[in-house]
Amino acid sequence: MPDETHSGHRGRLRERYARGGAEGFLDHQFLELLLTYAIPRRDTNEIAHALLERFSSLEGVFGAEIAQLMLVEGIGESTAVFLRMQGDLFRRLLLRRASDARGNVRLNTPAAAAKYAAALFALHTYESVAVVCLNAKMIVSSSEPLQRGTLNEALIYPRNVAETALLRRAHGILLVHNHPSGDPSPSKEDAETTEAVRTALESVGVRLFDHMIVGGSNVYSFSAHAVIDTRGDGTAAFALEEFQARRSQPQPPLLKKVMESY
């Protein structure tokens, strides 16, 4: 396809977006338009389709690692970085929603902490671990990535968690990790890790407020012993058994409130 044909098609895509925004675009069309700003002289329609075929969805594309993106023909390092930045920007905007007028994020309930945790791990395709440090007013002072693992495993070392909490002078912490499968159900190892981390933190005078496992929009809270649905106001939760039954046989969950303070 000649360059002038590319130019005309790109121009029409951009004019269409300027007139009506993204609502009228299919996923591949929106991705095609986005790629025109990273790939100056190539048909981005074909590349957009290849990306969606490989990663299944826009979420998959924007959550993919740079090295994974570069496996798609037509995607160089600069374009891969450009696409990865879209996912990082999305996460940052989600986290900003948790801030008050002063820019502070207060996580004093399982519901509030679950929404923050879900935003922190939005679009993550690998199992990762983070330590969210809180001050005495339950305001986030820092969020520290601690470990990055594979598609289904990330090791948590209690000593590293304690060292991070001490370094950041945390009053207490939230330990957060994700299950890329989308199922936040805790394993026996997750429960054992929670107690090991709690013991390590107590030895240095720091409190473990919660250990949260993120599975998409659903987050398991060890403190509340419940799976919290972070969509909407984030106050809907159900016992683990109810959540697992709902996954195998869709049915209305028994709702509980998780707004009580820690």
Image (cartoon, rainbow, N blue to C red):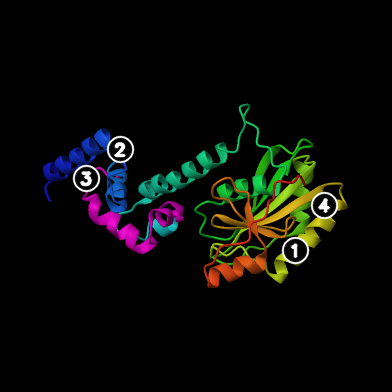
Q: Secondary structure at mark 1?
A: helix
Q: Secondary structure at mark 3?
A: loop
Tell whether 199 sits left or right of 134.
Answer: right
What element does badge 2 sit on?
loop
Q: Residue furthest top?
A: 102
**Cα distance between the residues tagged 2 and 3:** 24 Å
State the CA–CA distance, disc 4 to disc 3: 55 Å
Q: Secondary structure at mark 4?
A: helix
Where is residue 205 drawn, in percent x and y? 87, 46
Q: Quadrant of residue 246?
A: bottom right
Residue farthest toward the bottom in the current orientation of the protein: 248
Which range of residues does the magenta coloring cover?
A: 38-66
Nearest to the eye among marks 2 and 3: give it. Answer: 2
Give the mark, 4 or 3, whose residue is nearer the N terminus: 3
Local crowd size for mark 4, using a 10 Å CA cut-off: few (<14), some (14–19), many (≥20): many
Residue marked by disc 2: 21
The residue that disc 3 covers is: 41
